[in-house]
Amino acid sequence: MQFTIPQVSAALLAVATGASAASWYIRGEQIDVLKEQVSSFQAFEEMDLLSLTKNANLATEKLSIKLKEIEDIDALIIQNKNQAEKILALDELNKSQLNKISILESQVKSAFSSTTVFSLKRSEHIKLFNSEYVVAIKSVQSDDVFFTLNNSSRLLSPGEYIKIENAKTPCKLFLESMESYSLANFSVLCEKI
């Protein structure tokens, strides 16, 4: 079978038209796919990545600050617990020391039959043991007191004492403290016999 030129031409024209139509169809699909991609990029761009990134950074910073605050609070809780334990230990030590002081006070009271406490200002005097001793203040200085005991000049600092007697009972005249260069506080302790 032989084909004529018009038949071959018609067949070639039909094949070319079909190829052209197929090419246009494929290109149309490619164009649709590209349009979808462009739409996706536009939607992605509309999400404003810069703003999203800034918001993510702000959230991260706030979380970091909160975590630091939680860590600081935890450290303070531990420090508070340690301080509470130290306070309890010091409280126990204080109770123990107060108990020792009480014991020592009772021992002092049992060792001495009488205690007399008095205060004198400059130029004042007191008579002790039915006027057997006369104590008169001459001056109260920063670290000591200058006074007379039975017309004999003496100098005492707080905590120091002078031995005296009350009807042959040994006693001690203590300088307890001084106040603002004007007042001296004394005590007299007499031993039990």
Image: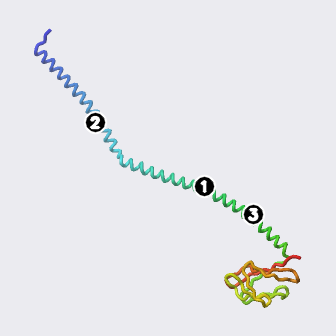
The residue sitting at 73% across, 85% down in the picture is: 155
Q: CA distance from mark 1 to mark 3?
A: 27 Å
Mark sitting on residue 138: none
Secondary structure type for disc 1: helix
The mark that comes first in sequence, 1 or 3, is 1
Secondary structure type for disc 3: helix
| Residue at the disc numbered 1 | 78
Tell me, what colour scheme is on the image?
rainbow
The mark that comes first in sequence, 2 or 3, is 2
Q: Is residue 27 above or below residue 2?
A: below
Who is closer to the viewer here, 34 or 140? 140
Residue 119 position within the rendered picture, expressed as x and y whole percent measured from the top left: 75, 83
| Residue at the disc numbered 2 | 35
Q: Is residue 99 above or below residue 55?
A: below
Residue 99 position within the rendered picture, expressed as x and y whole percent measured from the top left: 77, 65
| Residue at the disc numbered 3 | 96
What amino acid is labelled 1 in the image? Answer: Ile
Quarter occupied by the N terminus: top left
Residue 67 position within the rendered picture, expressed as x and y whole percent measured from the top left: 51, 51
What amino acid is labelled 3 in the image? Answer: Ser
Do the CB atoms of the residues marked 1 and 2 lie less than 8 Å apart?
no
How busy is the neighbourhood of tag 3: few (under 14 within 10 Å), some, or many (20 plus)?
Answer: few
